Amino acid sequence: MPEGDTVFFAAARLRRALAGKVLTRSDFRVPRYATLDLRGQRVESVGSYGKHLFVRTPELSIHTHLKMEGVYRVYTPGQRWTKPAFTARLILATDDAEAVGFSLGLVEVLPRTAEHTATAHLGPDLLGPNWDAAEAIRRISEHPDQPIGVALLDQRNLAGIGNKYRSEICFLRRVHPATPVARVADLPALVDEAHRVLTRAAHHPPWRELAYGRQRRPCRRCGTNLVVHLLADDPALARADRGIYFCPRCQPEPPGP
């Protein structure tokens, strides 16, 4: 699933293509909005919150979520698409750009006044201007027995972390991902690490993976081969590729209670 930095980049790409311009075409290829026509509407802004993306006109907000396979591409008018046309779910065009959302997991149109309902259940946005570390810590701490590797992925705690960056954050803090939240030695430092990692990935790409995807390869600190495990009670594990990567030496499993 795309992570917060990927959505942040997508929003920036759409902002360059659409913001301040008048739509010459809109095509919602989802049944609920198939007849909606936004031609003549000016795009006021494009923004993201965690893994959610918003394209805003004066009265409406087009809310999309990439889910597992979604992606945005921007083309010049008439340019051939690089993804299959049947996977297009949203097309927004201006005189000089055509933005296409392929395989989007969610497309909905909200009144601007109701946009907040799409994100009200989420924790603070790691890449947002109003990042609130104290609130993220409070939310994570409400479930003291939950493995920290699960807590980091829960968007209700803090918004923007996916499977890659939860592995990277735990690795950097030398915390085993199965460690219960209450037994993390310095939870504020770990939350600050999450903010630092996502900010670095979004503003100074590319991120060089330290743990993610490196199973059976040597740890960059100690040389021990990294491993990938599935965490118990992890809602992400409906997919087998959602294991978390760590170093068994640098991140030792916590002893039993």
Image (tube, rainbow, N blue to C red):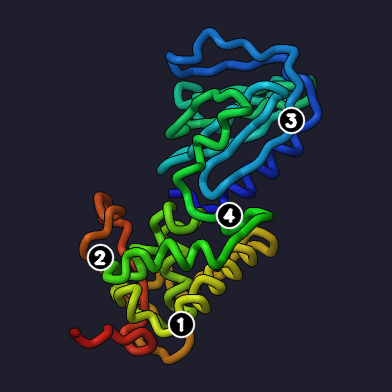
Give yes or no for contact between labels 1 and 2 (Cβ–Cβ under 8 Å).
no
Is residue 101 left or right of 74 when viewed as pictured?
Answer: left
Q: Which of the two discs, 4 and 1, labels the residue nearer the N terminus?
A: 4
Foreground tag (1 vs 3): 1
Q: Secondary structure at mark 4?
A: helix
Marking on residue 18: 3
From the viewer's side, name the closer residue of 43 and 75: 43
From the viewer's side, name the closer residue of 114 and 196: 114
Residue 244 lies, in percent from the top left, at 34, 67
Residue at the image position 69 percent from the left and 41 percent from the top? 13
> Mark 4 and mark 1: span between their CA atoms?
25 Å
Q: Secondary structure at mark 1?
A: loop
> Mark 3 and mark 4: span between their CA atoms?
20 Å
Foreground tag (1 vs 2): 1
The 10 Å Cα crowd at callout 2, few under 14, some 14 to 19, many 20 or more, is some
Q: Which of the two discs, 3 and 2, labels the residue nearer the N terminus?
A: 3
The 10 Å Cα crowd at callout 3, few under 14, some 14 to 19, many 20 or more, is many
Is residue 11 left or right of 172 when viewed as pictured?
Answer: right
- List the single residue furthest toward the top: 35
Q: Secondary structure at mark 3?
A: helix
Marking on residue 88: none
Foreground tag (4 vs 1): 1
> Mark 3 and mark 2: span between their CA atoms?
41 Å
Marking on residue 186: 1
Residue 10, relative to residue 158: is it above or below? above
> Mark 2 and mark 4: span between their CA atoms?
24 Å
